[in-house]
Amino acid sequence: MKNDDEKIELKWWEVKQGLTPYLKKKALEKKANKHAARKAAAAGASNAGSASNKFPASEEKKSSVKEKSRSDNKSAKNKSFNNKSSDIKTSASGKSRKPLDSLFEVNKIPSDAAKLLEDFDSVISSTHPLNSKQRAQLPGIIRTLSHKLTDERGDRRLGYMNSPEFLMAYVHYFMQWNLVRLTRLFANLSPDFFNLKDGDVCLDAGSGPLTLVTALFMARPELRKLKLTWYCMDISQGALSLGENIFLSTAAALHCEAWNIVRVKGEFGSTIKEKVSLFASANMFNEVVQDFEMPPDYLAKKYAEKILSYTKEESGILLVEPGFPKAARFISLLRDAFLRRKCYMISPCTHCEECPMDGKPGGKWCNYAFSTDNAPKKLRTLSEKSSLPKERAVLSFIACRRSQKDESLNEECDLKKLEFRIASDPIRLPKNKTGYYACSSEGLLLIESGQTLLSGDHISIPYPKRPMHEDWKSGAKIVYLD
């Protein structure tokens, strides 16, 4: 075994990421098995095709088939000749490749929710109005709170959740920006993920002023019709009370019956009476990851067990965190812990393999971003007055489902296609080219494309027939799109 390990050379980025020869050997064996399965599937398809040719056919049909195959062979030869400088050219006839789905398509937000979001300040004011003096002081308090949230993390929960002025600043600014992020994301999630029905119970841990519950109610009209019960858990009774009033006003503004809210004052881990069909949290674990007193992988296993203890055997789990490296790393560790406990990924992952953007030192971290050009005008103005302008909204998240059914966990993958999700802004490459990092079952990809792609785009292409080259800087496999 030692001799085999010594033969395996590690790239510099693999050494930096803590990879060992043994682990690399196992990864290479797994990759070889996958390629063998892909070849077997292709051979099976060709055998099926040759078997079908044994049946009698007219001479006219035979000649047309031959002519078509000759023309296809000629075009394939010409295409390979023109693409000698490339590893693979995957798009046909220079046509732009449309994503299967995207995480942040603004048109997916319901029109009534988009209209309400544009003037959400009036919803807050209808329950908790500010006088002229408080409104004038608001930008300064927002700046102070922002400083506490970023530089004084140790005591921030006691600071803003129990201080009336900080809580009001949080609701008018940070809650609204979180609504912008979450409504855009929730509106683009697959309907199959939620899979809720009348009478189901859900849990929002670290609920604060019910931002997640309000965003989900706005983003998914089909869920508004359901009679759901939400346990909203937080250590601040004031935040829960304020949030419930805002949520009820939101439901009234949308002319819908509100979900049943059960406030639970307590830390994450507090007991509730029922098992839930959906566990959700937003911006809860970023407070945990700021100060790792224990190893993060241990904490991830611990919190994964806690989350699963709340849920039914068939249930959904939705975790959203800010898109900075430590939070993304923790989300990746939670993802790994859930996969080991009979859960399967719905989004953003296009696979259930090892995460190639797990936030290890020297590596990439999984985060997705969109422009704030479509954010409410009043909110952008308030940001500028507070000297906190936002050009992009960034987040890291996972949406997965717990299942006891083996068929859900062992779905057959399409060995003829390579699916990936764009997970970066455009990257300037040599020779005036543009690239994007992407996540796939083959690991980290560097997509080189003349087509404009957006963070969160999910794309499927025919699987490359030739081995993909590796980028010398990142170790990513290079894929070329026309």
Image (cartoon, rainbow, N blue to C red):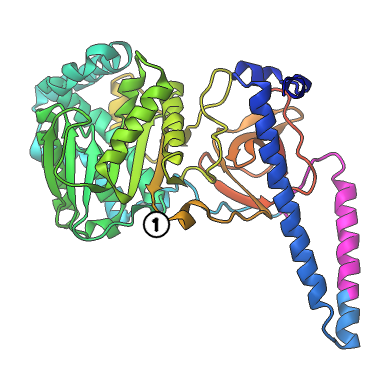
- Residue at 80%, 74% in the rendered image: 51
Horizontal relation, residue 337 to residue 195: left or right: right
Please tell me whether residue 143 belongs to the stretch shown in magenta: no
Name the one closer to the observer, 139 or 318.
Answer: 318
Residue at x 66% of width, y 53% of height: 415
Magenta span: 66-94
Residue 226 percent across, percent down from the top left: 21, 59
* The N terminus sits in image quarter: top right
> Which residue occupies 76% across, 47% down?
89
Q: Pick whichever, 150 or 392, lies toward us.
A: 150
Among the 4 quarters of the image, the one containing residue 472: top right
Number of residues whose C-alpha sits closer than 10 Å to that of mark 1, classed few (under 14), some (14–19) or many (20 or more):
few
Left or right of 72, for residue 161: left
Eyeballing the image, is 464 above or below 15?
Answer: below
Residue situated furthest front in the rendering: 1
What residue sits right under mark 1 in the picture?
Answer: 192
Looking at the image, residue 6 sits to the left or right of residue 333; the answer is right
The image shows a total of numbered marks equal to 1
**Vertical placement of residue 420 versus 330, above or below:** below
- Name the element at disc 1: helix
Give the amino acid at mark 1: Asp
Residue 443 spot, x, y in % from top left: 62, 36
Residue 288 in the image: state x and y as whole percent. 32, 21
Residue 338 at least partly seen: yes
Residue in the foreground of this view, choosing between 232 and 35: 35
Task: Look at the image and tell me whether residue 371 can be seen.
Answer: no
Residue placed at 65% from the left, 44% from the top? Answer: 451
Residue 364 as seen in the image, left or right of residue 326: right
Check the image and report above or below for 163 versus 438. above
Extreme residue in the bottom direction? 58
